Image (spheres, grey):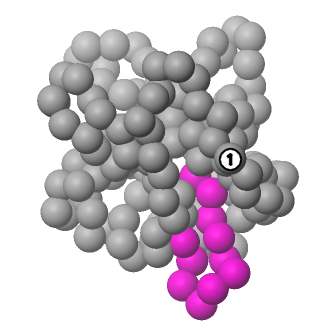
Amino acid sequence: MAIAIDNSQPEPSTFIVNQYRHPINQNIWQFPIGGFNPDEADPIDAAKGELLEETGVKVGNFDYLGSFFADPGFTNQKVHVCASKDILEITDQQLEDVEVGLTFKKVPVSTVSQMITSGEMGDAWGMAGHYYLSSYLKTI
């Protein structure tokens, strides 16, 4: 999971993506996230790449915040969470073919909590990401 924080305004903002998810038959807002092979890639490098691909946001330093199991009742998939306040530039998305229709936006961090409550960002990964984001903001 890749969390970028824009501190250029009085209230920090972050970038989220919206895409259609077949299992729930609807679009949902999420933090940028993608799969990677831990034997071949570093979680920080994977997060940088995913953030650039899905949002066009290029960052410098990324901090590794931790990890959690996606759903240990179904899978051994582990989600790694990385965050950066070091935004270098914002360019065009570099979407893969399977990500057609994926959009992104920058929202105030306080909006993420509201989106979780309303269900617009109603996945467990978004809730976990919000936890990590809130904890990270206390350190910067």
The question of residue 9 being in magenta is answered with yes
The stretch of residues the image draws in magenta is 3-13
100 part of magenta stretch: no
Q: Nearer the viewer, residue 107 or 43?
A: 107
Measuring 68% from the left and 29% from the top, which residue is drawn there? 46
For disc 1, the neighbor class at 10 Å (few under 14, some 14 to 19, many from 20) is: few
Residue at the spot of label 1:
92
In this rendering, position of residue 31 left or right of residue 41: left
Is residue 135 visible in the rendered image? The answer is no
Q: Is residue 62 left or right of residue 18?
A: right
In terms of secondary structure, where does tag 1 sit? loop
137 vs 94: above or below: below
Nearer-the-camera pick, 12 or 105: 105
Outermost top residue: 39
On screen, 133 above or below 34? below
**Residue type indicated by callout 1:** Asp
**Residue 6 visible in the snapshot:** yes
Relative side of 73 to 12, left or right? left
Q: Is residue 91 above or below residue 76?
A: below
Left or right: 19, with 36 as reference point: left
Task: Report the quarter where the N terminus lies.
Answer: top right
Which quadrant holds the C terminus?
bottom right
